[in-house]
Amino acid sequence: MGGTRSAAAETRTRQHSTGDHGAADAALRCAAALLGHLPLAMQRTLGRLLGRLALQLASRRRIVAERNLALCFPDASTEARARLLLRNFEATGTALLECATAWTRDPRTLAGRVDVIGAAHLEAAIAAPEGVLLIGCHFVSLELCGAFLGLLADVDAVERRGGDGPLERLRRRGRARHFGQLIDRGDVRTLLRRLRAGRCVWSAFDQDPGPGRGVFVPFFGVATATVDAAPRIAAIAGARLLFLDHWREPGTDRWTLRFRPLPAGFPSADARADTARLSKMLEASVRERPSQYLWAHRRFKTRPPGESDPYR
């Protein structure tokens, strides 16, 4: 894999690196660097153990994941869902250590362990004068696969800001190493400006947008509040669209990124129908590797009128 980082990314990384917030930041950086540079097999073993521990101790997240799996796989037996829950927490624990790798390690050292499906779609889209909107999703390997994405192309990323604590500063400093610009998910103006300037921007659409936002479309047969901005933003900016999913190959230290074009006629004049098509693509991807999706997120919290919060 090849690619170059933008001058803006280099400058921003230096700015983050020179901002000293004290001993807590330094200690966290050292711990992350230590964990991020562990041998991959050791990381994988420790990650599974961490996930098993979280399954016992993180009761709130476990309950959310259990409820999500019950909603999405109602025909599966209780035992089958329990096995899936365990594999999901093991994958999530491993992904937490992958974050340390993504934020502190040069991803070029792992480039030989990355497979890319549909690279020609990405290359063709970037070669065109229009901007490119990469529509992503929350598989647990998001952070490290984002670092690998930065090796393939000069990409901006849309993110949700999380305050200004030591962990957030570490995360943003780590992400700044791989992306040209980090765009707050509420900053639509900057997103449009970057796309109109011909940039490639990565943005996930599969988290609960909150009451009064987005549209309800089916996801595993459940009416799910979903961000409907992607097709409208692409149409306004005249951007090309690609769907990106990614995963860690089970039981290995290899990862895969897959780029796919959107169906013909996308985007259309019907944002709800377009969002439903995206949700269908996401569901098909999750069904391929259900243990690697972010089930601990309260995906179904916002309900249509008359329905109660399933997590209460």
Image (cartoon, rainbow, N blue to C red):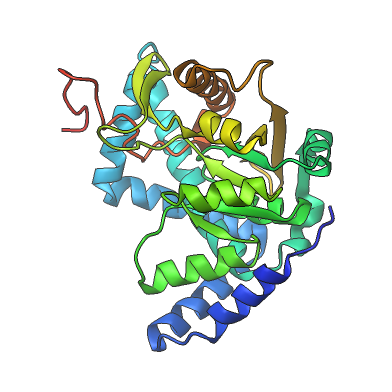
The furthest residue to the top? 75
Residue occupying the point 62% across, 52% down: 194
118 or 291: nearer the viewer: 118
Q: Does residue 271 lie above or below 188 as drawn?
A: above
212 or 168: nearer the viewer: 212
Residue 48, visible in the rendered structure: no
142 or 228: nearer the viewer: 228
Whole-percent x, y for residue 52 in the image: 40, 48
Q: Along the horizontal axis of the image, is 303 left or right of 204? A: left
Quarter of the figure with residue 60: top left
Whole-percent x, y for residue 38 in the image: 62, 67
Whole-percent x, y for residue 205 in the image: 48, 36
279 or 141: nearer the viewer: 279
Residue 309, visible in the rendered structure: yes
Say how many tags the image has: 0
Whole-percent x, y for residue 47 in the image: 51, 54
Residue occupying the point 15% across, 17% down: 306
Q: Does residue 283 lie above or below 193 as drawn?
A: above
Quadrant where the C terminus lies? top left
Residue occupying the point 46% across, 87% down: 20
Q: Along the horizontal axis of the image, is 153 left or right of 83? A: right
Q: Along the horizontal axis of the image, is 27 left or right of 309? A: right
